[in-house]
Amino acid sequence: MPSAFISHADCNRHEMGSCHPECPERLSAINDQLLISGYLNFMDAYDAPLASIEQISRAHSALYVQELIAQSPKEGYQLVDPDTKMNPHTINAALRAAGAAIQATDLVLDGAASNAFCCVRPPGHHAERDAAMGFCFFNNVAVGIRHALDVRGIQKVALIDFDVHHGNGSEDIFRDDERVMMCSIFEKDLYPFTGEYIPEKRMINVGIPTRSKSDVFREAVEQYWIPALEQFQPEMIYISAGFDAHREDDMGNLGLVEGDYEWVTKKILEVAQKHSQGRIVSCLEGGYVLSPLARSVAAHIKVLIGAD
Ligand SMILES: [Zn+2]
């Protein structure tokens, strides 16, 4: 069965000004790289649907969703956080990005795709239940997870986040949800300055020191994530796939390379094959320098499609 590649042209219409690092060119660079690599030939491509307000409200408060939509500007920009602004197309892009996670969930659970990659923006893992933050509006992966749990009857889900920044939004949404285990590795003492290791809350948050490279990252995966995942035995695995821990990405100060993204994807796939019938939904988060972003996504997808 092929992997699914889910995206939408609307995701390119959201932009936050010419100097903003979370820019539409990110998706174009990824697409170009995947075309050159030939990997898209092995995937079924889908246009992401718009998530409904009801679907979004499984991860966010209804009031927040209402207020965000009400702030959508007719022209120009509306600032919602010091780093995060809306243009007239943002809401549609954000609804598509969350809709991609829902569609990915359905495709994988229906057996129509072996796994799925959501190539979308805006990203989601900083968006809290009641707040937009850090380039994020709706927490795409969280919307997908709540769809799996509340609508599709899945009982246990793992969320794996290897973005250089801690996914504070995902923690905010899932800390008290016993059905979800969050495993993250991020740069310590970096924005958003959150992410405590709380195993009793299934928050396997591991901050690693600035300038850490492959060895420290891989050790943390083996020491913290794998035993926790083996014990939890998730029925499905979601990935907050941020690639800004790459050594060429200046948004953080970690030293990962493409080979690390390939390696960690293999590790996740092994757990998924053992416990979760191979079910993986991966959603793009960060990664801001175009060339390493595109190369890293390709390394991740190479494993998902089984071309490694
Ligand atoms: Zn990030």
Image (spheres, rainbow, N blue to C red):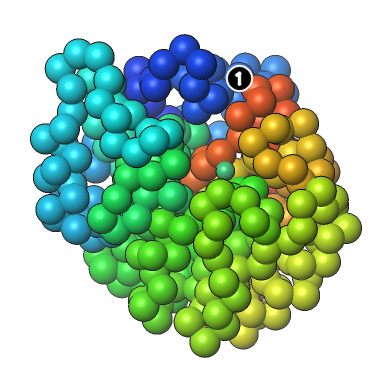
Measured from the top left, where is residue 168 in percent x and y?
A: 46, 58
Task: Name the quadrant containing residue 95.
Answer: top left
User: Please, is residue 41 above or below residue 216 in the view?
Assistant: above
Measured from the top left, where is residue 104 in percent x and y?
A: 41, 47
Ligand 1 quadrant assignment: top right
Along the horizontal axis of the image, is 135 left or right of 130?
right
* Number of marks in picture: 1
Point 27% across, 20% down: residue: 77
Point 66% across, 67% down: residue: 206
Reading the image, the residue beneath label 1 is: 29
> Disc 1 residue type?
Ala
Is 41 in front, or is 294?
294
Is residue 90 visible in the rendered image? The answer is no
Measured from the top left, where is residue 3 in percent x and y?
A: 55, 43
Measured from the top left, where is residue 268 in percent x and y?
A: 66, 61
Along the horizontal axis of the image, is 118 left or right of 103?
right
Q: Quadrant of the C terminus?
A: top right
Neighbor class of circle 1 (other Cα within 10 Å; few <14, some 14-19, many 20+) is: some
Is 250 in front, or is 91?
250
Task: Name the quadrant containing residue 75.
Answer: top left
Looking at the rendered structure, the secondary structure element under dot 1 is helix
Is 259 in front, or is 169?
169
Along the horizontal axis of the image, is 202 left or right of 74?
right
User: Please, is residue 212 above or below residue 73 in the view?
Assistant: below
